[in-house]
Amino acid sequence: MKFSYFWWNEELNLLTEASVDSHRVWIQVDKPRDGPLFRKTQACRMQYRKCLRDSQNTETVSYTNNLHDALLQKMGKRSGNAGAPSLRVLTNVFRLTVKWTRIVSLTILLIISRK
């Protein structure tokens, strides 16, 4: 069964591959505790973990704040069950907005990294 997190992105895929590759090379040379291979392995690992934490935190905070602001505006205009169908539509719009924002930012990162 294939499973992925909603905050997972292409940058994390690339960092995972780089980290795994550098770790494999490090193991093949008998796991030195100093030198350029050790430093590269540690740098790849730290970069991957930092990006992982940032992605988890950024997606949660930005999605929650956007949705919260929209709900506050929506609840001020209506009361009772009158806004229930519109609330589902609004929630779906925000999910799509977050998804497209992620795609655009990944595209920009890939363009920048190629230069």
Image (tube, helix red, strand yellow):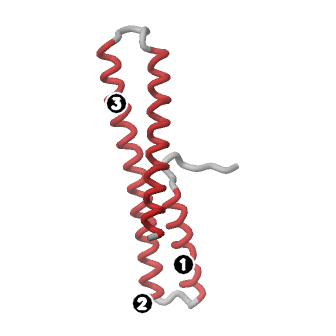
Furthest-right residue in this view = 1
Residue identified by numbered label 2: 34
Spatial separation of the CA atoms under disc 2 and disc 3: 49 Å
Residue 103 x/y as whole percent: 49, 49
Residue identified by numbered label 1: 23
Residue depicted at x 51% and y 54%: 9
Q: Is residue 81 above or below residue 88?
A: above
Residue type at numbered disc 3: His
Label 3: how many Cα within 10 Å (few below 14, some 14–19, many 20+) = few
Label 1: how many Cα within 10 Å (few below 14, some 14–19, many 20+) = some
Residue depicted at x 48% and y 35%: 95
Going from N to C along the chain, the mark reached first, 2 or 3, is 2
Residue 26 x/y as whole percent: 54, 84
Q: Is residue 82 above or below residue 46?
A: above
Residue identified by numbered label 3: 68
Q: Nearer the viewer, mark 2 or mark 3?
A: 3
Spatial separation of the CA atoms under disc 1 and disc 2: 14 Å
Q: Is residue 12 above or below residue 39?
A: above
Secondary structure beneath dot 3 equals helix
Secondary structure beneath dot 1 equals helix
